[in-house]
Amino acid sequence: MNIQILQPPLPSRSRDNLPVIVILHATAGAKASSSINHLRGVGLSYHYIITRDAKDSSKSATTENTVPVIFQCVPDIRQAFHVGSTIPAPGGLGFNRSSIGISLANIQRKVNPEPYPELQIVALNELLAHLKTTVPSLKFLTTHAVIQPWNRSDPFNINGEEIAMRHGFEFFRPTPEEIEKHRPKKL
């Protein structure tokens, strides 16, 4: 597993609670590096971004069969800014306060979606196994699309329930009532 600590880190704030949930995302951008630059410019962040390969290729079709880089953009003990949903996370706090956000570099087209390179998924699984042992407060896993379905669909073609089960997490899904109650009035 190739984890590189991003210096300087992306925006974050201290938190006074332990994270309980992992939220999976996709960048919707070409490269992890361009996504990092964009996030820095708009004041948002993930804890981790996983490239497609070692050279941070911009498309799955051009990846090399090399170990992806996992950029740690925010320390696990700090709060990153990656979810806009007001649905309460397990434990009742907001998702940003309660989570670790992991994003896969992937363009996220609805038509002809970009596949995830096999080694990128291997890196995701290695990172989740690592987090399961190093952050024992993590009990749940979900996806951005599940907790913010009114305007997010990422990560396409990722089976969050299967990933949660494989790593010993409980899959979190808000109730239809919670979704409706927290859906923004104007979209």
Image (cartoon, rainbow, N blue to C red):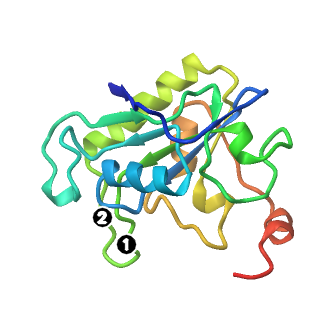
Badge number at residue 75: none
Q: Quadrant of the N terminus?
A: top left
Q: Judge the density around disc 1: few (<14), some (14-19), many (≥20) Cα neighbours within 10 Å.
A: few
Residue in the image at 44% along x and 30% along y: 127
Residue 22 screen position, x and y as percent: 60, 39
- Is disc 2 in contact with disc 1, using a CB cutoff of under 8 Å? yes
Q: Residue furthest bottom?
A: 186
Q: Position of residue 2 (x, y in %)?
A: 30, 26
Q: Position of residue 14 (x, y in %)?
A: 70, 30
Most foreground residue, 41 or 135: 41
- What residue is shown at x 48% (from left), y 34% (from top)? 9
**What residue lies at 39% left-to-right and 51% top-to-bottom?**
37
Q: In which quadrant is the C terminus drawn? A: bottom right
Q: Which residue is mark 1?
A: 109
Q: Identity of the amino acid at label 1?
A: Arg
Q: Is residue 149 left or right of residue 59?
A: right
Residue located at (52% from left, 37% from top) = 47
Q: Amino acid at mark 2?
A: Glu
In the image, which disc is placed on residue 114? 2
Which of the marked residues, 2 or 1, is nearer the chain's N terminus? 1
Q: Is residue 123 visible?
A: yes
Under circle 1, the secondary element is loop
Lateral position of residue 175 relative to residue 121, left or right: right
Name which quarter of the figure residue 91 lies in: top right
Q: Is residue 26 visible?
A: no
In three-dimensional space, the C-alpha distance between marks 2 and 1, rounded to whole angstroms, equals 7 Å
